[in-house]
Image (cartoon, rainbow, N blue to C red):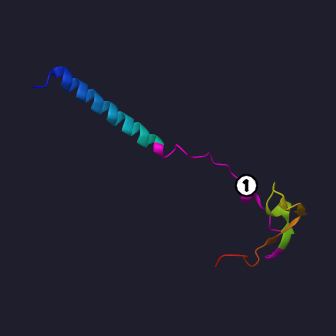
Amino acid sequence: MATLETIESKTVKRLRSIFTLVALLANAGTGFAQGFMNLNFEAANTSSYASSGFIPTNNAIPGWTIYMESTYYPIVAYNTIALAGC
């Protein structure tokens, strides 16, 4: 016959296990998340340029600069044929 102390001990162990499981599951979704950083792509000003062609980098992607290896590119292609994809 189980004593009252044994029953309480088992109950405490079960509650501790349940609490630990709930704490782990509650933290699982945010454990490896990073903060959000707005890259400000919606600040592009393309309204004064043709519907397609080349526009200055500072208007297309404000705050960004384009380098390929050590060569600086002051203009970018805008609304042209995609280089990859469908």
Give, as a single range, the part of the protein colored magenta.
28-53
Instruction: Classify residue 50 by image quadrant.
Output: bottom right
Q: Secondary structure at mark 1?
A: loop
Residue in the image at 80% along x and 76% along y: 52
Instruction: Classify residue 4 by image quadrant.
Output: top left
What is the magenta segment's predominant secondary structure?
A: loop
Whole-percent x and y of residue 1?
9, 25
**Residue type indicated by callout 1:** Asn
Q: Is residue 19 visible?
A: yes
Residue in the image at 55% along x and 45% along y: 32
Residue in the image at 33% along x and 36% along y: 18
In the displayed structure image, the side of residue 16 where residue 28 appears, left or right: right
Q: Give the residue number, with chain letter if any, for mark 1.
A: 40
Please rate how many residues cluster around mark 1, counting C-alpha atoms within 10 Å: few if below 14, some from 14 to 19, many from 20: few
- Above/below status of 50 relative to 6: below
Q: Nearer the viewer, residue 52 or 77?
A: 77
Whole-percent x and y of residue 39?
71, 54
Q: Nearer the viewer, residue 14 or 86?
A: 14
User: Is residue 34 magenta-colored?
Assistant: yes
User: Is residue 50 magenta-colored?
Assistant: yes
* Furthest-left residue in this view: 1
> Where's the C terminus, which quadrant?
bottom right
In the displayed structure image, the side of residue 60 where residue 85 appears, left or right: left
Q: Is residue 50 visible?
A: no
